[in-house]
Amino acid sequence: MSGTARIEISAVSHRFTDKPVLREITATLTERRIAIIGANGSGKSTFSRLLNGLLVPDRGRVTVDGLDTARDIKAVRRKVGFVFQNPDNQIVFPTVAEDLAFGLKGLGLGRAEREEKVGQMLARFGLEALAAQSAHKLSGGQKQMLAIAGVLITAPSCVVFDEPTTALDLRNARRIAEVISGLDETAIVVSHDLDLISDFDRVLVFDEGRIVADDTPGPAIAHYLRLMQ
Ligand SMILES: Nc1ncnc2c1ncn2[C@@H]1O[C@H](COP(=O)(O)OP(=O)(O)O)[C@@H](O)[C@H]1O
Ligand SMILES: [Mg+2]
């Protein structure tokens, strides 16, 4: 796989308690680089979790290339990967290499092919020297790289990132920005980092569970800055 995914969100509403968190959202996402910005609590993470079926909406429908996230969850997860804000939520295996290999389980690959793919990912993300090291001893920046590598190794056509640089220092944030900018895959990125998203194709601005602006970065960021005044 790889290439692009077409994600359709149709009349989606969601609430965890009495308060609606997403209100009647409809959007079709096809661009290669899409950003999601908005105030804390505006529903960005909830929305992003809908896109690969981590969350199924109370009302409405989400489809990925025509597959309903409420029904075809396995196929949806193969198409859309998800990188959490905190990489500790993503890293499950003791060593760096084992953690990467885990993502390939169930894809029907032979051992040699799995090892080759793991080797390629380690090299791509500068983690070769750390292959046998405990994943939980990595620095924050290295953990985020491993988390991204662990998603990319499954060859999704789209990757959703929820605030991938928020916990990182400037150097590591820049590295992650470079990784995102170099991806062949579609990227949908929730972020407060306005530099990171300044050259994206499309920016969705969230406010109280609604998309209040949907535009190129210039006008969308201007809308967001007005909201924040
Ligand atoms: N699992 C949950 N249970 C209850 N409330 C939640 C849950 N997840 C999010 N919320 C609430 O939904 C609202 C939107 O949250 P979220 O989508 O995380 O916003 P954002 O990512 O924009 O900060 C917030 O009021 C938050 O407290
Ligand atoms: Mg969030």
Image (spheres, rainbow, N blue to C red):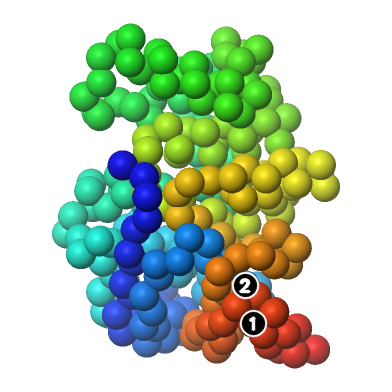
Q: Label 1 CB, ligand 1: below 8 Å?
A: no
Q: Is residue 23 left or right of residue 35?
A: left
Instruction: Give the image location of residue 40, x and y in percent.
Output: 65, 73
Query: Of tags 2 and 1, which is closer to the observer?
Result: 1
Q: Is residue 76 left or right of residue 155?
A: left
Q: Is residue 224 visible?
A: no
**In the image shown, does 173 or 123 lie closer to the viewer?**
123
Write down the residue under mark 2.
37
Write down the residue under mark 1.
220
Picture quarter with the N terminus: top left
Instruction: Give the image location of residue 52, x and y in percent.
Output: 35, 56
**CB within 8 Å, label 2 to label 1:** yes
Q: Residue at x 38, y 25 (%)?
A: 102
Compared with residue 113, is residue 56 higher up or lower down, i.e. above or below?
below
Q: Residue at x 38, y 62 (%)?
A: 51
**In the image shown, does 81 or 89 lie closer to the viewer?**
81
